Image (tube, grey):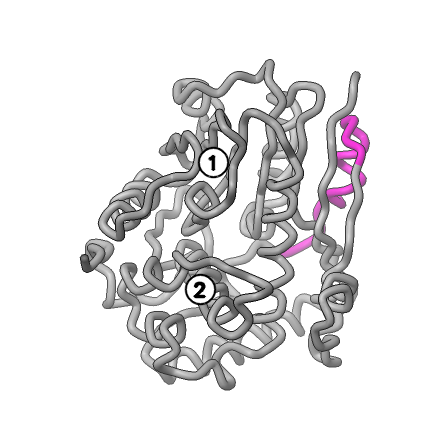
Amino acid sequence: MTASRVTGIGQNPGMASRREGDTWDLASSVGATATMAAAARAIATRSDPARIDDRFAEPLVRAVGVDLLTRLASGETPPGDLVEQVWIDVAKVRTGFYDAFFRESAVPQVVILGAGLDSRAYRLPWPAGTVVYEVDRPEVLEFKTRTLAELGAEPAADRRVVPADLREDWPAALRDAGFDPSRPTAWSAEGLLGYLPPEAQDRLLDVITGLSAEGSRLATENRPNPRPGDEARTKAGLDRISGRWREQRFDTDMAKLRYYGERHDVETYLAARGWVLTASTVRELLAAHGLAPLGDDDLRTGDVRYVSGVLPRR
């Protein structure tokens, strides 16, 4: 069965800078990054199925309906310079990191924040009785639920959607869906914090901590604060990528989607709130998986740390 496309998709209007109260769908603004990430997972799954198996990534991207991303995800258009090998390899280690985190968590509740096109509720082997809450904008969750149903996919856990913007009162919506803060929870904030203003990052981590019972677990990323010149180099690199994509009629401006400037170090911030953490850099994860080292232009990417931890007895 052919999955339904997102209403209005296919005529990408370009991406404006982030602002308070801005909106998006899976083909525009920050929402399109979820579709880009899924396209990278689809490419990685096709090229290295022994290392990553996200069988839903390609059909979900196809359903969104952005022509370039569909061609990349399906293999019709080779990645070439459009998706550099380093980003495909990062998709492999990032997906593997979060998959392993959830497999090892063994807690009754899971909360995936900014769930986007994440299909783990469908593709991971969850223990019996696990409840997986997915938090994201209503239209994103409705689209994914409908698309996967049309594909004949069924959740492997008790999947509960929580239609809420993370800038609003999402904890209330989470409780309304049945979340019990007295039970241990495994939380993920994958690829999320850089798209939040620094103060919103702090609020999110504080709310997660406040809702976490003893034995809860958390996985996210920690991007180092910029050194002099780092942000200019980052923006220039993103502008180069966006230029290549615009040549393929996908009008994106990736440099405008992030929030820049200094913010609290995630590991230090969480440790001060009682979390016991471990972390590995992207560089370390690539080496551990036998993947190619980063080039000179990607060295700061290698400093990004994938963080996981537990909240012990207080």
Quadrant showing the C terminus = top right
Asked if residue 78 is positioned above or below residue 198 in the image, the reply reads below
**Residue on which the image places disc 1:** 167
Q: In which quadrant of the rendered view does residue 160 lie?
A: top left
Q: Secondary structure at mark 1?
A: loop
Across and down, in percent, residue 126 comes to 52, 36
Asked if residue 77 is positioned above or below residue 173 in the image, the reply reads below
Q: Residue at x 59, y 35 (%)?
A: 187
Q: Residue at x 47, y 81 (%)?
A: 79
Asked if residue 259 is positioned above or below residue 79 in the image, the reply reads above
Q: Secondary structure at mark 2?
A: helix
**Residue neighbourhood size for the residue with mark 2, other residues' Cα within 10 Å, grouped as few (<14), some (14–19), many (≥20):** many
Q: What is the distance, in whole Å, between disc 2 and disc 1 at their CAs?
A: 22 Å
Q: Residue at x 61, y 41 (%)?
A: 103
Which residues, given as a range, are shown in magenta?
260-276
In the image, is residue 5 part of the stretch drawn in magenta? no
Across and down, in percent, residue 263 comes to 70, 47
Q: In which quadrant of the rendered view does residue 33 lie?
A: bottom left
| 118 to the left or right of 150 | right
**Residue on which the image places disc 2:** 36
Lower position in the chain sequence, tag 2 or tag 1:
2
Q: Disc 2 vs disc 1: which is toward the camera? A: 2
Q: Residue at x 38, y 82 (%)?
A: 77
Q: Amino acid at mark 1?
A: Arg
Q: Amino acid at mark 2?
A: Met
